Image: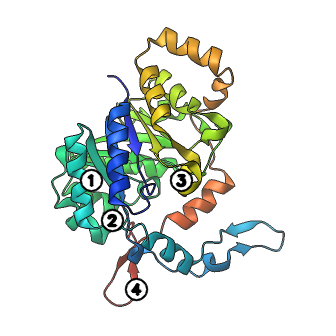
């Protein structure tokens, strides 16, 4: 099958329905197969004391990143999309001939988001929830097709998730990614896709390399290496106008990726070798240890969102 390209609009809409519509239209016109949004609500952000100032040990090693609660809630509250906005997103995707999907970041939001009319019942699972088996079970009650990122997830957790998906009888895709924002070509380890194939026939790459430094080389390399899916953040706004701008491709770069996809393997290899001679450093190895940055990000992002327990506390996605 030809590689499916997912344009991730993430929070690049800046909370504007008009910008969201323009992004979907631009992604569709540029050749994307799927457009992904994020079902995030600021009210679901949890306050955890170690991230208020960060934690550094006596030797100067960082043990927890600094990400104050109030600042995060304030930032995200400006980006909240209502359920009506979700339906608008779905309708606009259908109108423009692309498959809509979302990632739901807290379990208490699943039923209301899933109640909308998602064509094909596709769902994206962020890497920090790859091992959140209770979340996956609840999603499986409403969705049929899963695209699951595996960054910042231990090998045994990935294996457990694959076993659960098979137990539930769900179609699932595993995406390799590196949860460092941005990551370098040297960190990509695209060979990891081969390791993921022991669990599922369809694998791919979720790309967080920095556009300014590496263009879309990693995404092209993943296509050449056989990825069935490639996900990349997407924007129509200038780089500095959104938080995810530095790792987001433009319509022009999306068009270039679609054109690359249509080439023969021989011509893909020729383009990589001539235009991007450094591309092979992105192959790396099938197995690897997570970097310190990824472990720090896992600690923060896995638990950033949770569901109220009704008693003033939180239920995390893995509980």
Query: Element at badge 1?
Result: helix
Q: Earlier in the sequence, mark 1 or mark 2?
A: 2
Image point 63% across, 25% down: which residue?
A: 279
Dot 1 surroundings within 10 Å: few (below 14), some, or many (20 or more)? many
Q: Quadrant of residue 271?
A: top right
| Quadrant in which the C terminus is drawn | bottom left
Q: Which mark is residue 313?
A: 4
**Compared with residue 42, is residue 133 higher up or lower down, i.e. above or below?**
above
Dot 4 surroundings within 10 Å: few (below 14), some, or many (20 or more)? few
Q: Which mark is residue 89?
A: 1
Dot 2 surroundings within 10 Å: few (below 14), some, or many (20 or more)? many
Q: Earlier in the sequence, mark 4 or mark 1?
A: 1
Q: Quickly name the residue at label 2.
A: 81
Query: Element at badge 4?
Result: loop
Residue 309 or residue 276, whichever sits in front: 276
Q: Earlier in the sequence, mark 4 or mark 3?
A: 3
């Amino acid at each position: 099958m030809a590689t499916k390209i997912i344009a991730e609009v993430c929070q690049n809409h800046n909370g504007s329905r008009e910008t969201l519509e323009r992004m979907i239209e631009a992604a569709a016109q540029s050749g994307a197969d799927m457009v992904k949004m994020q079902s995030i609500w600021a009210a679901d952000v949890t306050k955890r004391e170690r991230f208020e100032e960060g934690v550094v040990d006596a030797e100067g090693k960082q043990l927890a990143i600094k990400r104050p609660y109030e600042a995060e809630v304030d930032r995200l509250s400006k980006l909240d999309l209502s359920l009506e906005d979700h339906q608008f997103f779905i309708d606009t995707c259908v109108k423009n001939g692309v498959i809509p999907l979302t990632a739901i970041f807290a379990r208490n939001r699943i039923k209301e988001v899933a109640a909308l009319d998602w064509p094909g019942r596709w769902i994206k699972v962020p890497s920090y929830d790859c091992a959140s088996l209770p979340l996956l079970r609840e999603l499986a009650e409403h969705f049929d097709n899963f695209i699951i990122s595996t960054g910042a997830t231990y090998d045994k957790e990935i294996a457990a998730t694959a076993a659960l998906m098979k137990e539930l009888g769900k179609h699932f895709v595993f995406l390799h990614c590196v949860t460092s924002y941005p990551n370098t070509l040297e960190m990509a380890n695209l060979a990891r896709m081969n390791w993921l194939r022991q669990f599922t026939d369809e694998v791919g790459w979720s790309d967080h390399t920095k556009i300014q430094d590496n263009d879309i080389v990693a995404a092209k390399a993943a296509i050449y290496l056989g990825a069935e899916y490639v996900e990349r953040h997407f924007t129509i706004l200038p780089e500095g106008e959104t938080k995810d701008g530095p790792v987001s491709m433009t319509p022009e770069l999306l068009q270039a990726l679609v054109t690359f996809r249509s080439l023969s393997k021989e011509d893909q290899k020729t383009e990589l070798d001539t235009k991007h001679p450094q591309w092979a450093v992105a192959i790396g190895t099938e197995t690897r240890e997570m970097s310190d940055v990824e472990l720090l990000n896992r600690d923060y992002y896995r638990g950033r969102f949770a569901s109220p327990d009704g008693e003033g506390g939180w239920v995390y996605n893995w509980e």
